[in-house]
Amino acid sequence: MTVVEIGPADAVSSPREPALQISGITVRPRQTPINRRTFLAGSVAATMGAAASWGRGRAAALDNKALIAITLDLEMSRHYPKRGMMEWDYEKGNLDADTKKYAVEAGRLVKERGGLIHYFCVGRVFEQPDVGWLKGLAAAGHRIGNHTYDHVNVKAKTPAEAQFRFARAPWLVRGKPVQQIIRENIETTTIAMNGRLGIAPDGFRTPGGFSDGLDDRPDLQKMLLDLGFKWVSSRYPAHLRGKEKEEPTPDVYASIIAAQARARPSVYPSGLIEVPMNPISDVTAFRTTFWKLDYFLKAIRMAVEQAIETGATFDFLAHPSCLLVEDPRFETIKLICDLVNKASNRAVLVGLDAFAERARARAGRELSRDPRANSAE
Ligand SMILES: [Zn+2]
C-alpha cells in the first residue's frame, strides 16, 4: 500500500484527521499547528519557514501520477448572486451565508469522495464573528491558503490600483507606499489566520491571475519568500473565450486545452515555486463570457482528462460565491472527483502543496543534471 503524507515534515498528524483513501493511495493530510509562544514572540515567518522542510519521499510517491486539485477562493465576486452587484469590490471578505454554506458543502462532498479542497481565504473573513466553519474545514484535512486581506492587486503601481476600497477610502492607507500596503495585506492575513484558526496559511494565491505569473517581479518573489511562503499560485495562461452568450466553438476548447501546457508548476530563479491555475476559471466562463454550465463541464472534463492521460497537473480554480448561482448542484466538483476516481492509480486529488513539492523535487533533479535548468515540468 502506498502511503503519501502531504504537509510540513515536522507537523504532527492530528487524530481528528483520518487518512484518506484516494485511488489506492493512503494520503495523510496535515497542517502545521502554530505554537502560540512562538507566534507571540513575533516569528510567524520563521515558524512557517522551519515547518516547511518538506521530505523527499512523499514527492517520489506522487511522481508518476496526474495531480488534480480543486481550489476555491473564499471571497465575494462582483455580479453575484445578481448581475449589477458591485459592492463586493469594496468588501471582498465579507462572505455571505450562502457562500459559506456552498464552501462547506463542497468540502464535505469532496472528502466523501476521498479527496480534499485547497481553499484560499481573504483575510477580512476573520473579522466575522463566527469562523467555526473554517475551523471545521481545516480539521477535516482541507488546506487553507492566504489570498491577501482585501483582495489586493499585488502588481498595482498605486494604492488606488491595489484595491477599490483604497480608492474610495484613501485615508485607510494614507502616506504608505504601495509595496508596503501589499506586504501588510498579506502579512495581516497570516496573523489573522494564526489568531483565529491556529494554523499557518498553506500557500499564497494572488488575487487575479497573471499570464506571466511573477516572471516580471523578482521583488514580489523575494517578498513572499521573506514572508515564509515556499510557493505562489499566480499564473493563469491566456486563452480564447469565444463570444459572449454563445456556445464556444471548437477553437475555443482547443485553445483552453493548448493553454494547459503553460500552466505547469515551475521554480522561479529566486527559488519560489509557481503553482499556476489551469483554465478555464468559473468567473472567466460564467461572469465574463456568460457560459452555460454544460460548456463549462465540457471544458473542465477535457482539461482534466488530458492531465490524467499525460500524468500532468490540473489546478481547478473556482469561487463558491459564483458557483452557488451557476452550478448549484456541485456538478463540476463531482465531475472532477469522478474523473480522478475512475483513473484509479493514475491520478490523485491533492492540495497545491503537493504540486509544489513535486515541482521542487523535479527541479532539484534537473539541476543536478544541468546547472542552468530551472523549470520543473
Ligand atoms: Zn480572488
Image (cartoon, rainbow, N blue to C red):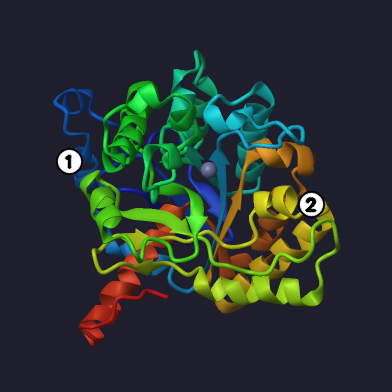
Image location of residue 54, percent across then percent down = 28, 55
Give the spatial CA distance, label 1 vs label 2: 45 Å
Q: Residue at x 28, y 43 (%)?
A: 179
Nearer-the-camera pick, 334 or 46: 46
| Position of 38 relative to 369 (above/below) | above
For the residue labelled by badge 2, is the local secondary structure a helix, a strand or a loop?
loop
Specify the label residue 290 is tagged with: 2
SS at mark 1?
helix
Residue 349's place in the image compared with 201, above or below, is: below
Q: Can residue 274 be seen by looking at this rendering?
A: yes
Q: Amino acid at mark 1?
A: Ala
Decide if residue 146 is in sight here: no
Q: Is mark 1 within 8 Å of ligand 1?
A: no
Q: Is 376 drawn above or below residue 143 in the view shown?
A: below
Q: Is residue 143 left or right of residue 70?
A: left
Q: Position of residue 228 (x, y in %)?
A: 25, 45
In percent of width and height, residue 217 lies at 31, 60
Residue 347: image location, x then y, percent: 57, 66
- How many C-alpha atoms fall within 10 Å of the one at disc 1: few (<14), some, or many (≥20)? some
Q: Which residue is at 66% across, 36% downward?
A: 321
**Residue holding disc 1:** 46
Q: Quadrant of residue 241?
A: bottom right
Callout 2, which amino acid? Phe
